[in-house]
Image (spheres, coloured by chain):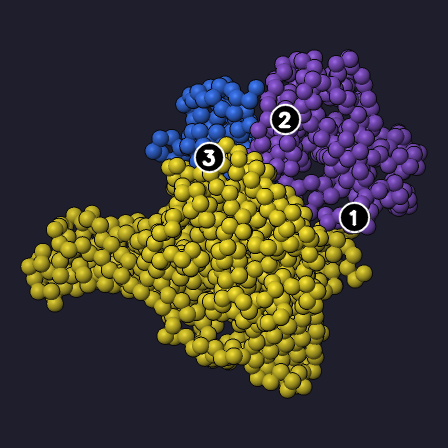
Amino acid sequence: MSIYPIGECLPRKDGRAKVTGKSKFGADWNVTGQLYAAVLHSPHGHAKILSVDVSEAKKLPGVRAVLCGACCEVLYGHMLVDQPIFAVNKVRYYGEPVAAVAADDLRTAKEAVRLIKVEYEPLPLVDSIDDALSKKAMVHDDLMAYQALGGVSPVAGTNIVDTYTLKHGDIDEGFKQADVVVENEFYCAMGQHTPLETHVAIADADEHGCHVYTPAQSPFMIRGVLAKAFGYRVDRVRVTCTEIGGGFGCKVEARLEPIAIALSRAARKPVKIENDRGEEFESALCRGPVRFRMKTGATKDGKLVAQHMLIHWDTGAYTTFGPRINFNAGFGANGPYHIPNAFVDSYVVMTNKTLATAYRGFGITEVACAHETQMEALAEKLGMDSLEFRLKNVLRDGMESVTGEIVTSMGGAECLEKAAEGIGWKDKPRRWVTEDGKLRGKGLACYMKLTGTPSTTSAMLRVNDDGTVTLLEGSRELGQGVETALPQIAASVLGMNPERILMSPVDTAFTPYDKTTTASRSTFHGGNAVMLAAKEIIEKLKPLVAKKWKVDLASIVFKDGVFTSKNNNTLTLHMDDIGKSGIMKEEPPVLATGTYGTKALWDAPDKYHQSKRPAAFWMIGAQAAEVEIDPKTGTTKIIRMGAAHDVGKAINPDSCRQQIEGSLVMGVGNAIMEEMIYQDGVLVNGNLVDYKIPTSMDADFEMNIALVEKPDPEGPHGVKGIGEPGLAPTAPSIINAISAACEHRFTTMPVKPEDVLFRGE
Amino acid sequence: MLPAFELLTPTTIAEACKMKLETKGKLLAGGTDILVGMHGGKERYETLIDLKGIEELKGFDTKDGLDFGALTPHREFEQSALIKERYTALYEGCSQVGSSQIRIRGTVGGNICNAAPSADSIGPLLVFGATCVIAGADGRREVPLSEFFTGPKKTVLGESELLERVLVPSPVNGSGSAYTKYTRRRAMDLALLGVSCYVVLDAKGKIEVARIALTTAAPTPIRATNAEEFLVGKTLDDAVLGEISELVAKQAKPRSSWRSSAEFRIELVKELTVRTLRLAEERAKGEA
Amino acid sequence: MTHKTIKATVNGEVYERTIPVCMTLAEFLREELGLTGTKIGCNEGECGACTVIISGKPMNSCLVLAVEADGAEVLTIEGVSQGEKLHPLQQAFLDAGAIQCGFCTPGMVLTAKALIEENPNPTEAEVRKGIEGNICRCTGYNRIIDAIMNEAERVRGDK
């Protein structure tokens, strides 16, 4: 049964403003009297700061404040409070802010920065995961000295800032049952989210409070971090959200906001700060590198019996959300498979590189690379078709997952079948050679991802005097369509025209609390909160309807957007006519809140991360790729991709498809193009030509997308999430296809033409 | 944001040469290299001399060969049916520079004077035997394009000189040309390797003249002269092409960098020279 | 000279301003005229977000000096719609679902507009190449290409 407007491809509500240039993104905001900031960044990856001389900079006319680590010893952090606003005593990554200037105009600020003199003494570089583990040098002298806010477990005397262990069954026993075992390594290079809009912030601050304007993905998290860092009362930190020109995870954390606040307090004026593209690459946030060592065993009839994963995440010079990636990806590290014996041994290490954070899936693309190359390798060794092999092992309702949960609502098998169908899997060999000598191959990949749990959100609905409805909820419109989906959900309860429901801008001063716009959680959590609020709105309107009709309140019935009276069938009032009806005139305003949290349903995982319910819901999907390799130049061309994801219920199917389409192209970048390259601690390709994100010319391939709908019992109308999932299996499916085409197992992301040409050497 | 500078706007070549001599200013054409470098703060100039007001530097003429002003934007060659037909390699080079926005602004003269080892227009112009007309305070001189570059980002231009025009002889009947640009991304990218070929076939289909230019294969764009000489009198069979790929590989001097290893570029030189030669040959025969 | 007084026509309105010569057109539009629909994504001509149409041609306004707009006609996203009514190309973007975060959208619309005006009968391959300089990180491009093809069809009167 369908409920209007659930499942309708309604046009996006933010579309008109965006297509006319009226949307105000971060840099489009200005505050009267604002100063402009420029930052001096570290030219070294790791160096002692011997001296900072700001005297010449201060003398430049128009300069209003100059700050460096020595005069601003504030630390902040989302999990471990380890990050200075400006480097103190030493710099830990190339691009780290060392000092900053606020001036009347940007050119003056930039000129002043050039006048700051810093003396450095280079320190040994912790350049890789192995460097970090070998303790060749310490990125932080004492990780234990920092305040831990939870979810982080630093190891004293090491460069390890977090550990995660998942243990299910008995791994040794499991491998004893295995007839075939494959062992491999996989390495994912450092990448960047690269939204078109760089980070930007405006702050108007003094010692009592601050007002920040920022394209934040998680305004309430950032509010908390800023309050803590500067000692503000939470209610005195106001975060006004601007439109966001792409996030993908990199606008989750406080980044430029602390610099803007510090400068604003020093200059006693509002300060605007904006990264240029080079700064964005060097000092914003990235997807950290990660290395996997995997060992997987199966019986000769193709049943998985054991899997061991050793994982090292490189989170860069400060902790940021590294431990959260470790945690989320740890749960998903075995894929959507029934594996009776599993062990995940995972660490987050620190290096002298820029900071890693959530990247569209909190590490799920990376773990999918690891477990999906294993599945291909096992299938190959067993002489089985890899689709058949996966179908034999994919989790189905009622099975126990590696997290100890009896799973339900599992769309994995259907996703695998449909993704494979999208490239005509069953009609094609694993690899073949075209008439003109090109190598074709097909590859498959799937993933399983949790949403962050527990988490909470609240929504408020307000009926305006003309009967339109304003929705206040903290989910941020990143382009994923939440500003359209949540009104659709509200309309489904209110039975009204969804065009008459608009989401309010998000501002911590008046928007009710929402944890964050990450983890593909917004439609699920926000939708639940909105439904509760909408139901209450109806209850609040009933007495007004009864009063107007002069009938008994108990006689008022609401169905499909229409109020009627059981006592008098000539009386009807549609929700769309509430305003005209006059029932709200001089009555108390009609508003309602709905709150939704997942703490109650959550079973806190034990130390081995076993839990009856570690997550509010799981996301599952699969993708298949067909690629063509030029064997003489190493070039990979994507021919077609099939994608199928279990969205639970598509509130707006077009929006869901758009998320997947964009993810496919982003995933092509991840798979064969994108890599942040450091040499001697210095980022060498921090611009949009040398860091290669796909252009329109790179997106020229066939896409066949299927939405699978296995409703989640907890989700509003059965919803799961789809913001991140499309990306997760893209790169691994492409890499598997390249491996098939070349008859060589590639073990890195990205796979570059050079790797293809010199394979096996 | 651009660091502050003084802008001069000459309207004649003589005026521009005088300004350059007196101010040591940087000549600005389309700005698609210079302004990019300045935005990031990597490059700073006290004076920019914008040449776009000089009418003499604009436009091209194809009556007797190709004679084009240094300010001709890439887009004009991309959109000229005559260039596409007669100077195919040049068309292929110019139409693969940056994006349409960049090709509308960026000039071929600027591409040459920027002297990047990867420049897309230079290889094709080298195989067509182009000559640079240089204007300076002391008058004009002509320098073959093959002698224009003295190193990466370095040219023979003196302190008062600018590139005025480029003269390209008309390709003869029975000739064909091609340019292959190898990139990691399929647009908006710099050539990891560029191969330009021009061949003239005799009546029997044997090679009478062959010219091969390699970009990003050495510190400056180069001609693969040993391979060119070897090709004379040959037909492009597999054995000859095998020899050719070895000969060009010997002449190429790519370096290893984070963009790619020298070994990879050598492999590309071998393969793409063969492909580009074949394409040029097909075009000479009127088959492609 | 370090400053110059220019008279530029932007979206049909004439503006006279004295500006530093080092100011780019993108800065002029955004900061002097408050036309923030023109986005700056890289300031290096590598993303296309700042594309505007100058005398009929699409250009990266971050690589054009504002003084060059003296006497020129500049069209920005704010001038594309016809009063309250969206330009059919803008409507085509909405209809095709060609917008997600929206940051690349203004530059993309202007590149597309110039493309169709130059060639109202483009092939899909020509459209794909035509927008090669406009990076979009969200959509995967295909819906943008659909939108442009649909609008070209409308312009030709096929639809």
| C154 over A612 or under it: above or below | above
Q: Colour of chain A?
A: yellow
Q: Quadrant of the N terminus of chain A?
A: bottom left
Residue at 67% in and 13% down: B15
Q: Which mark is residue A104?
A: 3
The spot of residue C40 in percent (x, y) is 51, 38
Q: Nearer the viewer, mark 3 or mark 2?
A: 3
**What numbered label is drawn on residue B256?**
1
Instruction: Point out the frontmost of discs 2 and 1.
Output: 2
Which class describes the residues within 10 Å of circle 2: few (<14), some (14-19), or many (20+)? Answer: few
Residue depicted at 57% across the width and 49% down the height: A98
Q: Secondary structure at mark 3?
A: loop
Q: Which chain is purple?
A: B
* Residue A295 in view, yes or no: yes
User: Does residue A235 appear to the left or right of A558 in the view shown?
Assistant: right
Q: CA distance from mark 2 to mark 1?
A: 34 Å
Camera-side residue: C129 or A387? C129
- Residue A435 in sight in this render: no
- In the displayed structure, A230 sits above or below A36; it is below
Q: Identify residue type, mark 1.
A: Ser
Residue A340 occupies quadrant: bottom right
Residue B115 x, y percent position in the rendering: 74, 32
> Which amino acid type corresponds to the residue marked 3 in the rendered image?
Asp
The quadrant of the picture occupied by the C terminus of chain A is bottom right
What number is the disc on residue A310? none
Chain drawn in blue: C
Kindly indicate the quadrant of the structure image that contains residue A128: bottom right
x then y, percent, for residue A275: 53, 44
**Callout 3–callout 2 Cβ contact below 8 Å:** no
Q: Disc 1 or disc 3, which is closer to the eye? A: 3
Q: Percent position (x, y) of residue A277? A: 57, 43
